[in-house]
Image: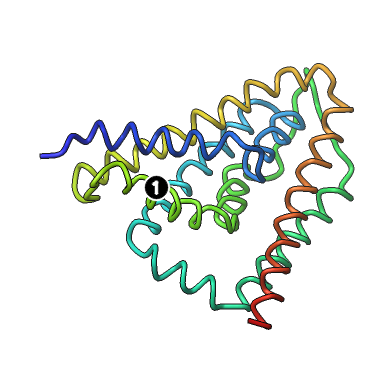
Amino acid sequence: MENPLLYLFVGFLACLLGTIPFGPINLAVVKTTVDYDRRSGVEIAFAASIVEMLQALIAICFGALISSFLDSNVLVKFFLAFVFIVLAIFIITRKPKPTLGKRINRPVSFFRNGLIISALNPQAVPFWIFALATISQYFEFQYMGLTLIGFLLGVFIGKLLALYGFVVASTYLKAHLQESSALVNRLLAAILLFIGLSQGWNAVNSLFV
């Protein structure tokens, strides 16, 4: 019987390394922590970790089929491009409302926001398809039963730990609140805009292939 702990460690390491580079999820965690509080950032991180685990499972079960579908379906690419460009415009035009040291109202569900942002991230499933292909070069993994549970649990822990690191790092940004909130807004909007334009460019190229 294969050791589920090995699957857990590999899933943890792959997700941890994949989360460290700046992207829409970790920047959303930073922005929420700076604008509101640590609890709100943790809610986004927890939701994103759940979605990441599901995305890894989807890649395991339907990786080849999804890769082919994304490559061939131009409408999906245009839709994703539109969504991320609209999100970028909304964030960059929204006036930051950071708070520090006072009671704040929580008008929205940050857990829900984390679910939505993570689910709409077009890079996640392709990342896991690539990660699983890389893992298969070193390990002959069979994802079933306890080994599948171990791998997905590692993915969840790796994502949550990496994003919690961004929550903790946001403590420094809190000390420079107004400036950092505007900066994080611009960074998040720039990344969302880049993803949207990339998806749009890929969709346009697909029309001429």
x and y percent of residue 133 in the render?
A: 38, 52
Q: Amino acid at mark 1?
A: Thr
Image quarter for residue 50?
top left
Q: Is residue 49 above or below residue 116?
A: above
x and y percent of residue 83 in the render?
A: 71, 64
Which residue is painted at 37% across and 38% down in the image? 11
**Badge 1: few (under 14), some or many (20 or more) residues near its Cα, within 10 Å?**
few
Q: The residue tagged with tag 1: helix, strand or loop?
A: helix
In the rendered image, the quadrant that contains the N terminus is: top left
Q: Is residue 96 above or below residue 113?
A: above
Which residue is painted at 72% across and 69% down in the image? 200
In the rendered image, the quadrant that contains the C terminus is: bottom right
For the rendered model, the colour scheme is rainbow
Image quarter for residue 173?
top right
Residue nearest the observer in this picture, 111 or 161: 161
x and y percent of residue 153 in the render?
A: 34, 38
Q: Which residue is mark 1?
A: 134
59 left or right of 101?
left
152 left or right of 117?
left
x and y percent of residue 177 in the render?
A: 84, 24
174 left or right of 21?
right
Q: Residue furthest left?
A: 1
Counting the numbered discs, the total is 1
Which residue is painted at 63% across and 33% down in the image? 40
Q: Residue furthest bottom?
A: 208
Image quarter for residue 75?
bottom right
